[in-house]
Image (cartoon, coloured by chain):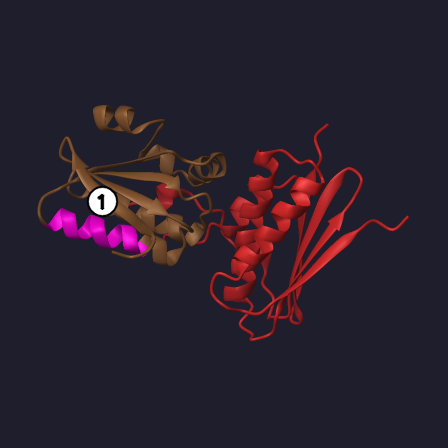
Amino acid sequence: MSGFIKSTKEANQIVIIETDGYLNNEGGEAISAICYDKMKSGQNKFLINMAGTKVVNSIGVSILIEIIEKLQEVDGKIGYYNLAPIVAKTFNIMGLTKYSTVFATEEEAVGTL
Amino acid sequence: MKQPSVELKLPIIPNMELIATQTAEVIARHMHLTEDQAGEISMALIEACINAFEHSKTDSNVFIHFLIEEDSLVVKVIDQGIGFDKTKVEIPKIENKIGKDERKRGWGLQLIQELMDSVEFESNGDGTTVTMKKNIKQ
């Protein structure tokens, strides 16, 4: 597990990935590697707990767009929670919120996704 | 009285933009900017640095100048690369990227313009200067 991925777990058939640190290209690739690996075994719902990620760049976020695209092919979904305000604003500007969902808490996310 | 300024010289090394954001955070605290404003400046700075690192096609350093003014913070990101033509940069839209054979990247300028109060680009064959301004809200 890379240093950027703090933990992974599953709840309600959803894979929950907890991140820690800068979401750059390496961070994005660490998330996508887990998602694509889990998709091979049929899982298609993912949540990212971004409590530990206060800084992102557009390259890292672009990799999330690639994941959204791949999930659309298998009728899957991805969501995020515990976003810092600037991360939420960045997701909004880049349009991620049109194709995926930002939740306030894990409880809301697991219950809704 | 001359307004204070801070200058950084960054080598083109991965993640060096985080040095610039750490400096921006200190300056934002000094200027009593809100957390939202500080976050917006840092994000815009990250994108401007990455553009300078990736697109300047040079090994030269990137220079960051923070100009602390009475009613605003001005941040200049200066590279000595080959320059670019802003009129040829397409405004990205996620609808045009998802499900299509389009590269998913290319968001830097859009983010900078959305997050800062004003942005100016000066670019020629000797380099590019991006001047970004965040007004202090009273």
Q: Which residue in the structure is indicated by mark 1? A: A8
Q: In x, y percent, where is residue A98?
A: 35, 33
Q: In x, y percent, where is residue A61?
A: 39, 48
Query: Which residue corresponds to the image point at 74% horizontal and 40% vertical from the top-left?
Result: B72
Report the side of A79 relative to B16 (left or right): left
Q: In x, y percent, where is residue A2?
A: 29, 57
One can see residue B19 in this view: yes
Q: Callout 1: helix, strand or loop?
A: strand
Q: Which of B72 and A21 is in front in this view?
A: A21
Picture quarter containing residue B113?
top right
Q: Which of B62 and A19 is in front in this view?
A: A19
Position above or below: B20 against B97: below
Q: In which quarter of the image is the C terminus of chain B?
A: top right
Q: Which of B31 and B55 is in front in this view?
A: B31
Query: Which residue corresponds to the image point at 56% horizontal and 63% vertical from the top-left?
Result: B52
Of helix, strand and loop, which mostly describes the magenta segment?
helix
Report the side of B15 relative to B23 (left or right): left
Q: Mark 1 is on which residue type?
A: Thr
Report the side of B94 relative to B36 (left or right): left
Picture quarter containing residue B98?
top left
Magenta span: A29-40
**Residue B29 included in the magenta stretch of the image:** no
Q: In x, y percent, where is residue B29?
A: 66, 40
Q: What is the tally of numbered marks visible in this picture?
A: 1
Query: Which residue corresponds to the image point at 57% horizontal and 47% vertical from the top-left?
Result: B42
Extreme right residue here? B1
Chain with red colouring: B
Query: Which residue corresponds to the image point at 39% horizontal and 52% vertical from the top-left?
Result: A60
Chain with brown colouring: A
Position above or below: B79 against A97: below
